[in-house]
């Protein structure tokens, strides 16, 4: 096996990272993550405050002004959240109940 | 794992902010000393990779998901200084651009997602490597265990902060049990992703992995050697 150059390793890694973000993120679980789950079960999820930049152009990994949710999410490789606490979600948009 | 504003009181948020600022400041000084032509692009790659993979939530139980923290992965890949800086940059971007992780909780999140799992995970990794034979398989196995435990340690650290300044009313003991049980499962995913990633790079260029620099790559006859240039 030939020795891979540093450039090949870095470019290859960036391609993998970009591919994961764009193509695999729609398959990501939409369930709350471990901390959100615990906070919900233990009754302190409501102590979370709205994010000060929740109205920012890229808030919740969507692109504001892009109404097509798939495209909006795909542009940053992520789904926007539904609640005041982040819900990392890719699969959600495929559900009929998606917001 | 990203802590939103409000979970922890102002005192704890300020204290973790000071600790994290100190940790990142120290890391900046040390990273500058060890910065090389190879480390800078690798640190950038690690930051981009952690950002991308953190978005990929995997299911861990009914109605619960987990995602990569990346602290252990980053520190195993590029060392404790550049590693914590790389993940801290990801957290700053997430908080400022993507409204992910509270602004007042930024110090808390740098501590819980970058510094604690990064330095804790790397310490476990290096300890395991001393116990295991010096080969690529050991690097992958140590990466798995270290990354798994780094998540459990981070979850424990959150509970410590919750005990000191949590705004919720749930008893610390129940929060502790819930956090540890779910984050052992999240840790399995963290371990798997970390072991796969470290293993992939180690298989082509072990010298580019901080935690595997002692493993000399297979002897290569190529342009570098013909020029008599030592590239390691």
Image: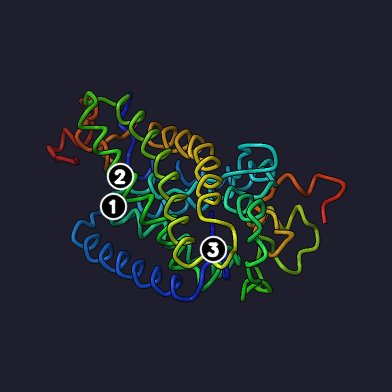
Q: Chain of mark 3?
A: B
Residue B37, how many percent across, how many down? 25, 53
Q: Nearer the viewer, residue B146 or A66?
A: B146
**Left or right of B203: which side holds A93?**
right
**Left or right of B8: which side holds B35?**
left
Please give the label number shown on residue B122. 2
Q: Earlier in the sequence, mark 3 or mark 2?
A: 3
What residue did someone put label 3 on? B94
Residue at 55% in and 41% down:
B182
Q: CA distance from mark 2 to mark 1?
A: 7 Å
Residue at 44% in and 70% down:
B12
- Mark 2, Cα crowd under 10 Å, few <14 / some 14-19 / many 20+, is many
Task: Report if the CB atoms under discs 2 and 1 are less than 8 Å apart.
Answer: yes
Q: Are marks 2 and 1 on the same chain?
A: yes
Q: Are marks 3 and 2 on the same chain?
A: yes
Residue at 28% in and 65% down:
B28
Residue B20, how many percent across, how many down? 36, 66
Q: Nearer the viewer, residue A20 or B60?
A: B60
Q: Nearer the viewer, mark 3 or mark 2?
A: 2
Residue A77 visible, this orientation: no
What residue did someone put label 1 on? B80
Q: In the rendered view, would you say A55 is above or below B81?
A: below
Residue at 32% in and 27% down:
A2
């Amino acid at each position: 096996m030939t020795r891979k150059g540093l450039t090949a390793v870095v470019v290859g890694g960036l391609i993998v990272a970009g591919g994961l973000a764009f193509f695999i993120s729609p398959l990501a679980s939409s369930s709350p993550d471990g901390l959100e789950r615990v906070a919900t079960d233990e009754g302190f999820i409501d102590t979370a405050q709205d994010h000060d930049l929740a109205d920012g152009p890229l808030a919740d990994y969507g692109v504001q002004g892009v109404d097509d949710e798939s495209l909006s999410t795909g542009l940053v490789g992520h789904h926007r959240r539904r609640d005041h606490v982040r819900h990392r979600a890719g699969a959600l948009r495929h559900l009929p109940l998606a917001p | 794992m990203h802590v939103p504003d409000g979970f922890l009181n102002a005192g704890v948020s300020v204290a973790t902010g000071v600790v994290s600022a100190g940790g990142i400041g120290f890391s900046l000084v040390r990273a500058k000393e060890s910065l090389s032509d190879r480390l800078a692009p690798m640190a950038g790659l690690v930051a981009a990779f952690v950002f991308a993979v953190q978005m990929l939530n995997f299911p861990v139980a009914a109605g619960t998901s987990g995602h990569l923290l990346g602290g252990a992965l980053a520190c195993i890949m590029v060392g404790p200084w550049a590693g914590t800086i790389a993940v801290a940059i990801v957290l700053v971007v997430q908080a400022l651009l993507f409204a992910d992780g509270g602004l007042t909780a930024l110090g808390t999140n740098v501590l819980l997602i970058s510094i604690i799992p990064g330095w804790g995970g790397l310490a476990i990794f290096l300890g395991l490597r001393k116990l295991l034979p010096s080969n690529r398989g050991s690097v992958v196995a140590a990466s798995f265990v270290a990354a798994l435990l780094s998540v459990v340690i981070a979850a424990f650290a959150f509970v410590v902060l919750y005990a000191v300044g949590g705004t919720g009313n749930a008893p610390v003991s129940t929060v502790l049990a819930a956090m540890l049980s779910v984050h052992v499962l999240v840790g399995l995913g963290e371990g798997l992703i970390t072991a796969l990633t470290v293993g992939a790079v180690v298989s082509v260029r072990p010298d580019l992995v901080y935690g595997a620099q002692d493993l000399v790559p297979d002897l290569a006859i190529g342009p570098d050697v013909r020029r008599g240039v030592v590239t390691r």
